[in-house]
Image (cartoon, rainbow, N blue to C red):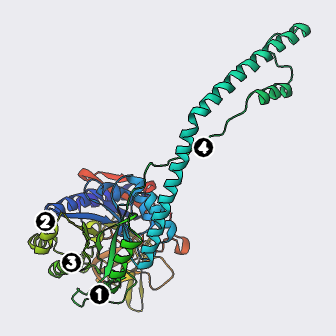
Amino acid sequence: MKAGVQQALEELKRVKLDEPICSYIYDLAGIQAQVREMLQTMPVNTRLFYAIKANPDPRIIEALLPWVKGFEVASIGELLKVRAVSRDVPILFGGPGKKESELKQALEQDVSYIHVESVLELRRIIAIAKERIVTRDEHMKQSERNDDREPEEQVQQQRRQAGREAGELAVKLADEQVSAQSGKRTGEQEDDTEYCAHKMVLEHPEQTWEVAGHRGDVPEVRVLLRINLRSSALPQTKIVMGGSPSPFGMDEEDLEEAIELLRVEGAGVIRLCGFHFHSLSNNMDAGLHAEMIELYLQKVEQWQQRYHVQVDIVNAGGGFGVTYDGSPGFDWPLFTKLLEQSESRKRLAARGGELFFESGRLLVAEHGYYAAEVTDIKRSHGEWFAIVRGGTHHQRLPASWGHNHPFQIVYTEQWQHAFSRPEVKQGRVHIAGELCTPKDRLHSDAEVERLRVGDIVVFVKSGAYSWTISHHDFLGHPHPAFHYLTEEDEHVNANSVFQSASR
């Protein structure tokens, strides 16, 4: 465990009130350092995006902003989280079930590329793009009509102004005459109703046409076609989205129809910039991953020749794995070395094309910590159970993936009670949460040297797919606190900054 995390926990123990510790700690400086290191080995025409589904914490997005090319989002909620941090950073917009309202809003938010998942979605995007152009043209015509009327309006306005001045002078003279007769001073209001009546006669507010926030032109709509390859050569992992029947992407057999649709109906309103692939998740084999990228690039070359299309971008997705059982994880230096040697990548670069990667888990998993204090220890049917303040409603990954999540123990000596402090020594213990379900288990049969009530169990590798995939409000337990480590291990408590995906 990083020294800064240990220090942050020590600080939390010192200042904690009556409630047990339950906190997430994100090492922002560690995330930045890892990304900087990853970028050093990437070939010149490759670009790294952060897939924020792994962890959309605004502080993480902000920390990565100077280092990644942009962000990949899979919903309008995620898109708006990025735009809240930066108005102009490049965004890739994906997801298999985009609604028309989402597509419209994505274009309004200036996404860089839309990943098209089906022929129907492509038809929707073309229709929306045409509608935007029609709206632009109508606004331009209205603006031209307003410009044509402007000289005449100026003359009419000058006449109305002269009329108002003459009328005001007449009223002033009449008021002076009445004042002289009644003994009142000029300027005193005789009656609110009469005063307002004079104003109504003399002032007629003019209505004008304004197009609020209208741009002079509509930015082009740029798309990447997401393809589900018909190939048995793809690596196999726990989570597979390509190479087999799947709701993700369009079938390779639909590609010809999609390109024809772009040429006929999409001409002049939408631009095909390339292709998108994302076939798997959490792959550990860097060599096989490089082979998969090579397959992608070769397929794209075949399509270029067959359909005579220009390809500026090949987005090879993510899927770079992290292990939770102590085995070796994804070898990024080996992967980028193989990319550097790839002849297909070199040909793409020679044509001016770029190769995108959108990684989530690999960038942040190692830099998140979920700390939960032990609130009870008991023996049941010969087995030990440690109950923590928290559980799978905060850190759902072990229940979702069916693994024992790695942890470390931070020992505390604080015990203020007269009765004995329960503990397990040199034994096995199940670490369970506070929920009323046997599924609330974070680690089974963990071997511990010692574990006591009041000690803190810190689940490492909790930076990705942990808090935001969890059922936060089940049973109504309080949410954890959120803390951040910045440069030089400075500890920042910024609970109010974090916004969950549901907010």
* Comparing labels 1 and 4, the label whose residue is closer to the camera: 4
Quarter of the view holding residue 303: bottom left
Residue on which the image places disc 4: 209
Label 2 neighbourhood size at 10 Å, few (<14), some (14-19), many (20+)? Answer: few
Horizontal side, residue 110 vs residue 301: left or right: right
The disc labelled 1 sits on which kind of residue?
Answer: Gly
Q: Determine the residue positioned at 8% across, 72% down.
A: 341
| First in residue order: circle 3 vs circle 2 | 3
Q: Is residue 327 above or below residue 69?
A: below
Q: Amino acid at mark 4?
A: Trp
- For the point 26% across and 61% down, which residue is it? 31
- Residue denoted by label 1: 243
Residue 210 appears in the rendering? yes
Q: Quadrant of residue 470?
A: bottom left
Report the residue marked by disc 3.
Answer: 305
Outermost left residue: 341
Name the image quarter holding residue 195.
Answer: top right
Q: CA distance from mark 1 to mark 2?
A: 29 Å
Q: Residue at x 22, y 61 (%)?
A: 35
Relative image position of residue 466 (x, y in whole percent): 38, 72
Q: Earlier in the sequence, mark 1 or mark 3?
A: 1
